Structures are given as structure tokens and as C-alpha cells.
Image (cartoon, rainbow, N blue to C red):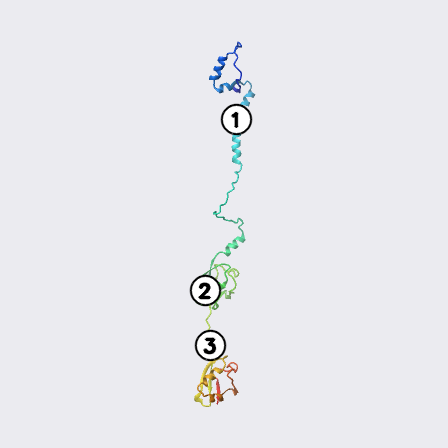
Amino acid sequence: MLLKPTAASFTQKKISDDGADDGADDSLWFQFSPPSSRTTAISYIDSEEDETEVLLKKTQPKINKKLKAANTLESPEPRRLHLIEEDDDIICINPNSGPQNSQYSESLREIPLKIRCMTHVHKIPVLSSTPLSDVLTQLSVILDAPPPRLMLLRKEEELPANSTVGELGLGIADIIECVVMAAEDSSATESSSSLTVRLQSKDRDSSQEFSLHRDAPLGSIFSKYMCKMSAPAKSKVRFHFDGCKVTDRQTPAQLDMEDGDIIEVWT
């Protein structure tokens, strides 16, 4: 059998069995007894149903406490908002990594382009967007030759200088051939554009040879020939080539002259 505490309030004075009002005893009772003794009473539980009710009342707070703790663990913690300060670094990451991103990174990747010139292999760092004209510029410094004299070949086919590395499909495994063309002989060019002309009078000992450009007027060598003559003699001088009179404004190219031709001087 269990004892069940019940709330009771001793608000009335204690009445003795004989009905007498013991005022002195009551005052002493309320003065020396503790508060709990004045508010707690003991009652008996006679039935099993009341016993079960008491157990439920005792265990219910514990069960509620455990359920609350379990709900707290299962429920997601509310997200906290963090304010971004001005000094913080913001990094953007693209979650969609696909073929387009790989092609973009490939275009930014630098590769060494192998170029063989005679027995040496030169490696020029390039991007897929680098034109071959830039490659020729770097090679001109290495080979000490101007870009117009350099020619790039792949499988004996000339590669256009205005195309890029990516457009031609060049990669690390490719080896490009570089041919250095010979420089033009400036002396040969000058000799082919100039000629020697002989001015000769009846007196063969007074003949003189002059060199001039094919497109230069003949008046320059005429003046040199007559520089030692007097003014009256100069006025009488006439120049003939192939039986025709020649003026000082005509050129060897106009007269179809060749190297070593003779212009007759008539006085």
C-alpha cells in the first residue's frame, strides 16, 4: 500500500475532541511547526488504478523530457546567416564541370611547340590561340634571321603564318620543320640593274666609260664627259646611239642598251 501526499491547508484552528478552543496550543502549533508540515497531508491509496495513476504522473515528466531531447537531435539546426565583410575573399566555384570548361582550360594551357632547324630542336612556348607569326618572330631572334626568310613545314607542306596553333591542330607530339631561306645577293641585284656605257669620239684615245642605272637619264654622264670642254665646244657636241640622236633625258632602258654599249660623240 502506497502513501499519497495530498495538499491540505490548515486554515482553521484545531478543535479538541471536547469542543474546547485551545487558543494557546494553536498559537504554539503554528509558531513552531515548519511550513511543509502545515501544507502536506498523507492519504492512503486503496485501489490498483490509483497506484497506476501515481506511477504515470511520476514517469510522465521524464518521458516528455526524453522526447523533447530526441526531437531536438532529429530536427535540423537552423541555418545561421553570416555577414560577409569587405575584407573577405569571395571565391566563385562553378559546379558544372563539363566539356566546355575543359576546352576553356585547354586553351589557356601553355605547351612547348617543337621546331627543328637543321640538327637542333627548339621549343617555343605557345597557347592554342598563338599565331604562327609570333612563333616566327621568336625564331628570328634565336636563328638571327628575319621572319620573311623563315618557313615552317609540316609533312613537307608550308604552314600559313596567319593561322593559330589551335586551328592547325598542333600539339606537344608534333615536330615542325623550319627552313631558313638564303638571303638575296644585293650586289647581284645592283649589277643587274646597272650597266657600263662608253662615250667615244672620232679620236679613240679620248673615249671614257661611265656606270649608271638603267632608269637613270643619260644627261648625268654627258655632263661628266663635257666638263673639260669649252663653252663653244659644248654647244657643238651631239650624241648618237645606233645611228640615232640621243638626248640627255633618255635612259638606257628606253634605248634598250646593254652593258658595254658605245655612244658616239659628234663634235
Mark 2 residue element:
helix
Dot 2, how many residues are within 10 Å of its Cα: few (below 14), some (14-19), or many (20+)? many
Q: Which mark is residue 139?
A: 2
Nearer-N-terminus badge (1/3): 1
Nearer-N-terminus badge (3/2): 2
> How far apart in space, not on screen, are marks 3 and 2 (Cα)?
30 Å
> How far apart in space, not on screen, are marks 1 and 2 (Cα)?
91 Å
Q: What kind of residue is marked 2?
A: Leu
Q: Could you say which is closer to the camera, residue 179 or residue 69? A: 69
- Residue sitting at x 53%, y 32%: 68
**Residue 11 in the image, given as x and y percentages of width and height:** 53, 17
Residue 23 in sight here: yes
- Residue sitting at x 47%, y 17%: 31
Kindly give the residue lying farthest to the top in the view shown.
18
Q: Is residue 96 above or below residue 177?
A: above
- Residue sitting at x 49%, y 83%: 219
> How far apart in space, not on screen, are marks 1 and 3 (Cα)?
120 Å
Q: Could you say which is closer to the camera, residue 158 or residue 232? A: 232
Q: Which tag is nearer the camera, tag 3 or tag 2?
A: 3
Q: What kind of residue is marked 3?
A: Glu
Dot 1, how many residues are within 10 Å of its Cα: few (below 14), some (14-19), or many (20+)? few
Name the residue that disc number 1 marks.
Answer: 59
Q: What kind of residue is marked 1?
A: Thr
Mark 1 residue element:
helix
- Residue sitting at x 53%, y 29%: 64
Mark 3 residue element:
helix
Name the residue that disc number 3 marks.
Answer: 190
**Residue 259 in the image, given as x and y percentages of width and height:** 47, 82
Q: Could you say which is closer to the camera, residue 19 or residue 114? A: 19
Q: Which mark is residue 162?
A: none
**Residue 72 in the image, given as x and y percentages of width and height:** 52, 34
**Residue 35 in the image, given as x and y percentages of width and height:** 49, 20
